[in-house]
Amino acid sequence: EDKVVQSPLSLVVHEGDTVTLNCSYEVTNFRSLLWYKQEKKAPTFLFMLTSSGIEKKSGRLSSILDKKELFSILNITATQTGDSAVYLCAVSGNTGNQFYFGTGTSLTVIP
Amino acid sequence: DSGVTQTPKHLITATGQRVTLRCSPRSGDLSVYWYQQSLDQGLQFLIQYYNGEERAKGNILERFSAQQFPDLHSELNLSSLELGDSALYFCASSVSPRQTNEQFFGPGTRLTVL
């Protein structure tokens, strides 16, 4: 059964800390892995990863994919209260053309 | 603002009823996706349309149906509603039907079934 598992489920850190969020997957015929940030509204796109070992960066956020070990990490450095959100990982495969979402990691950054 | 619009914002109805959720994709996007997000199940992919045709099907119940019209807006019809159908329903759009493309999410419709 295809699935995406994110860990931890929830994380509380102080401003300035660095966090690492994990996403592991078992999806037939993997095509891409996407990271989204969801505050109290719709998910917003962060990164799309298709190749192993190539880090994608956007400001304090970065992500990398390991297609051999079937996981991705999302790093956030120097966290700010505005980073508080649920971070969703989604994986697409071409079996049934489905997108599989993890249940998300809830990040709370306290001042 | 992603450019994807959804109406209504909130919907409260009773069990057994039928509702229609509407989505307008971003200008130029041909592909529309529907998702259901509930507290206990996270975000679940329901169905995808591309240029008016069904492209992919996920965990969509038989009581649910969708279509995409010539003007590319899409409607999700939910019938014989049950309490468990209460959830946030998102629509997303992308330029192409390929799974590797970024999707832009609408603000969602919150459905409450009493």
Image (cartoon, coloured by chain):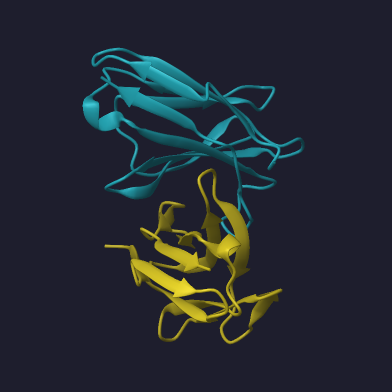
Is A14 in front, or is A31? A14
Q: Position of residue B61 (x, y in %)?
A: 30, 33
Q: Residue B74 at what x, y percent from top left?
A: 57, 26
Label the cyan chain with its letter: B
Q: Name the quarter where the N terminus of chain B is drawn.
A: top right
Q: Report which colour depicts chain A.
A: yellow
**Compared with residue B64, is residue B49 higher up or lower down, i.e. above or below?**
below
Residue pushed farthest front? A111
Give left or right: position of A56 versus A100.
right
**Up-down: is A103 above or below B31?**
below
Count the labels in the image: 0
Towards the viewer: A85 or B50: A85
Task: State which quadrant residue A64 falls in.
Answer: bottom right
Q: Position of residue A72 (x, y in %)?
A: 48, 77
* Residue at point 36%, 58% (across, down): A103
Residue beneath the point at 30% across and 12% down: B17
Look at the picture and state if B53 lies above or below A25: above
Furthest-right residue in this view: B28
Measured as percent of width and height from the top left, residue B72 is found at 66, 27
Task: For the C terminus of chain B, give its image quadrant.
Answer: top left
- Residue at x-position 65% and y-position 36%: B4
Identity of the residue drawn at 57% across and 79% down: A16
